[in-house]
Amino acid sequence: MTRFFTRERFGRPQFLAGLLLLAFLAQASWLVHSELSASASPGAPEQARIAAGWFQLHGAGIAGVPFPDISVAVPRELAQSEGFDTEHSPLLSLVTAAPLLSSPQRLLDPPSSSTWRWLPRLPFLACGLFLGASLWYVARRLCGNTGGFLALTLYCFSPSMIQASAVWHTEPEILAAWGSFGAIFTAIAVAHTLYAPREVVLWNWRRIVLLGVSLAIAVGSQFSMIIVVPLALAFMLYLAPIRRGAALTIWIAASLLALILLFATYFFHLQAFSESMRHASFWGATWRSFTVRGVYIQVTREILRACPALALLLPVAITTYILWRRTRYFGNTAPGLIALLFIALGMAHPHVAGAGFLLASIPFILIFVSGVLADLMETPARPLVTATVWGLLAAYILWNLQALTQVPRG
């Protein structure tokens, strides 16, 4: 036990990171409180997820799968779906409804909504915290404490990340963002361990499980996130060229585990699972979007809305990356390429999946920007760069907090 509670694991950096994450949780909770105070009942999309998850947890069908023989009353939003959910597995509905499992059904009526409506938001608030903690851990490993705190500060005061975690007038894409982030960086971590002189496949069983769970969360939250499965393999083969057999074996094991977990969200109902997979939209991209100027404008607005500080920091980071060779290493390049790919996929998916890809790109953008800025802070211009960056972050935090105060007034 004393080996676990060490200063390296629980020191000053971890304490400060915890404070930032608590600030993030407070902001997201404020949004939830503001929405629940202003409306007497859940919105239609949330009602549909709660109902679908509730019915599945009580053995009355599978969420997102049409079962005409269900005798219970199905909400109109589900009854009008006329078939399978082509974008999501039952995971989102199950996660939404799971906290309500212990509540008597009479307490779920609209008149008593104030006593239970917080519960469906708790899993997504937790996902937002977990994604922030994962972001800080990865950024700190790649670019030190400075880069870790830069990335975490940008994340914890990101309007889009706060909104997604609170599920405030938006779909719960935070689950797909967390799953895709975990899948990519777990694959990278696994590849780095393949150089250890041990029986790598058995020794990596914890990371195999973590990779499988991450893949299942990503794909289960959004079918088109299946792109992270080949991406994980590509990173593993690139980073471990002399252990590609072991990398492939680990990837296959993790993918099989992810498939089993995805099957589990259908409660191992083989017919429902097979039919759902047949109707699932694993691609659905259209490249016509790249010929429309308005798409580029809208995507730019979404990225800047996610983190307004990127309006200044992102051009600086990209210019520095292009001009300064020192910044062009794997720790900066990999998240930058993934962010670029997710932005392109967000543009190519004009409907529900596009928003998920754009949100998932933000943590990778923050790591890229923080890594480049951390490199700049190690140059002779460190005092000027440091003062400028932290001054901008202070203004960014104040702007976001001021925007939150306007929420109760609309």
Image: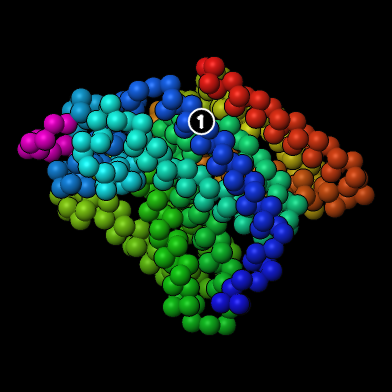
Give the total of numbered labels: 1
Q: Quadrant of the N terminus?
A: bottom right
Indicate the position of residue 380 as horizontal and vertical percent values: 92, 49
Q: Residue at x 53, y 21 (%)?
A: 408
Q: Main secondary structure of the magenta part?
A: loop
Q: Nearer the viewer, residue 250 or 117?
A: 117
| Residue placed under numbered mark 1 in the picture | 31
Indicate the position of residue 381 as horizontal and vertical percent values: 91, 45
Q: Residue at x 59, y 20 (%)?
A: 406
Indicate the position of residue 76 as horizontal and vertical percent values: 20, 25
Q: Is residue 356 visible?
A: no
Q: Is residue 376 left or right of residue 329?
A: right
* Quadrant assignment, res 251: bottom left
Q: Is residue 68 above or below residue 235?
A: above
* Quadrant assignment, res 120: top left
Q: Is residue 32 above or below residue 254?
A: above
Callout 1: SS? helix
Magenta-colored span: 65-74
Q: What's the residue type where badge 1 is placed?
A: Leu
Query: Is 223 a magenta residue?
Result: no
Q: Residue at x 33, y 46 (%)?
A: 99
Check disc 1: other Cα within 10 Å, few if <14, some if 14-19, many if 20+: many
Q: Nearer the viewer, residue 180 or 327?
A: 180
Indicate the position of residue 168 as horizontal and vertical percent values: 46, 30
